[in-house]
Amino acid sequence: MTENENGVATDEATVAPPPESAAAPAPAPASAAEGPPAFTRRELRLGATGMGLGLVVGIVGSLLVASVAGGVGSLVAPSPMADAATACDVETNSWIDVGDEGRSISMKSEGEETEGAELSDIVCIFGELDTPDSVINRMDSTRALDGRQTATWDQFSASWGYHPDDGLDIVIEVVDK
């Protein structure tokens, strides 16, 4: 039985420390992950600051653009011509053109020798502008010999011409009252 350093008896045998060798143990090899850091603290702070500023500028810029776009849209009076083109899904139709800041719409139908808008698109515009049947019937019965014809209804004035080779050429304008 032996006593430990506190004076308590134990059954364990005292183990002598290993003998010291003359040579110092070799240090453990450094792993590839260890070494100089990839970025200094200063570089990390600058990167984080730049990312934060970029995020703030992006959010503020997006909000600013959205508010300006909404504000500009509210300054422009609604356009029955543009609304009709949107409702009929013809904004990109090269034969139907909203002009004069939304105060006119020009339409050209196909003829025997030329291309143009489909009649269904033109009829859709007529419906959106509440074109009276009497005006549509006059357009439908126009001959090449009749020259340019005109009609008015509500807030609109229309003029049109027809030739079988070129089709129907229609301009509808908003009339100031």
Image (cartoon, grey):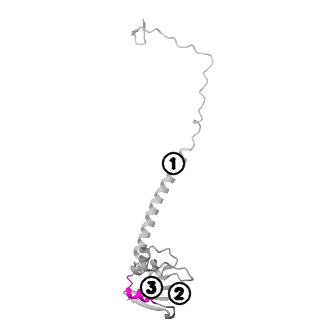
Residue 70 counted in the magenta span = no
The quadrant of the picture occupied by the C terminus is bottom left
* Residue lying at 50% horizontally and 75% vertically, measured from the top left: 93
Disc 2 to disc 3, how far (Cα)? 21 Å
State the extent of the magenta-drawn residues as a range. 130-141
* Residue lying at 53% horizontally and 87% vertically, measured from the top left: 164
Q: Rate crowding at label 3 as few (under 14), some (14 to 19) or many (20 or more) other CA atoms within 10 Å.
A: many
- Amino acid under label 2? Pro
Disc 3 to disc 1, how far (Cα)? 63 Å
One can see residue 64 in this view? yes
- Amino acid under label 1? Arg
Residue named by callout 2: 164
N-terminal of the pair, mark 3 or mark 1, is: 1
Magenta part mainly helix, strand or loop? helix
Residue named by callout 3: 172
Quadrant assignment, res 21: top right
Residue named by callout 1: 45
Nearer to the camera, 9 or 64:
64
* Residue lying at 43% horizontally and 80% vertically, measured from the top left: 123
Mark nearer the viewer, 3 or 1: 3
